[in-house]
Image (spheres, rainbow, N blue to C red):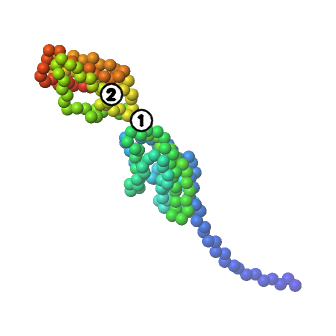
Amino acid sequence: EGLKDSTSIVFSIIAVNDAPEFTAELPTLSFLEDDSLTYDSKNWFAYANDTDHPDSALFFSVLLSRYLEVKPVGDAVRFLAPVNWSGRDTLELEVSDGELSDTSFFFIDVKPVNDAPVFVNFPDSVFFYHDTSLTMVMGDLVEDVDSPMSSMTWDFSFTSDSIEYVFNKETTELILTAPGFSGFAFMTCKVTD
């Protein structure tokens, strides 16, 4: 009676890798059209947590982007938009400890900028007889990705006072005449959006 026995046992508790997780909403980033943004990946540490690993052991990868080109640059990520594109893109970001991961979404706003009108296919020279006229459709010689031709302001100047012109802003037709004049003259055309 009253006999006892006791023993000790050693328990080994094996650590299990817990996945990193995003703990806060990721910030919306932005940059201007026709530009790029280089974003340091370390900035995302504030939005993720891993109970098993220090921040320096975590890796961030952009998995999905609809419009933007994404390029890793050292410890940063460079975002590039297509030429003349502006708008919002939704991107998927992964945080990983090398084994387990979590994903979250964030936005990048590419803000529009006003692009200048550009002359295209503008002839080096034209000729017409002094007793006739020349019609040029200026809207066919200019491109502007942001503004319609109807909003353009046009300015014409000539090296000879003998050149006369009529400009129709609606059709962008420029009608040139040179009554009683023959020779060479230069025209300077300026278009502003």
Secondary structure beneath dot 1 equals loop
Name the one closer to the observer, 141 or 72.
141
Within 10 angstroms of label 1, few (less than 14), some, or many (20 or more) residues?
some
Instruction: Judge whether 5 appears above or below 65 on screen.
Output: below
Name the one closer to the observer, 160 or 43.
160
The x and y percentages for residue 143 are 33, 32
Instruction: Judge whether 190 appears above or below 103 on screen.
Output: above
The x and y percentages for residue 137 are 30, 26
Name the one closer to the observer, 152 or 60.
152
Residue drawn where x is 76% and y is 81% of the image: 6
Residue 139 is tagged as 2
Within 10 angstroms of label 2, few (less than 14), some, or many (20 or more) residues?
many
Instruction: Judge whether 37 appears above or below 100 on screen.
Output: above
The x and y percentages for residue 174 are 28, 22
Secondary structure beneath dot 2 equals helix
Q: Which residue, given by chain and number where applicable, does mark 1 sit on?
A: 112
Residue drawn where x is 41% and y is 44% of the image: 81
Q: Is residue 139 left or right of residue 79?
A: left
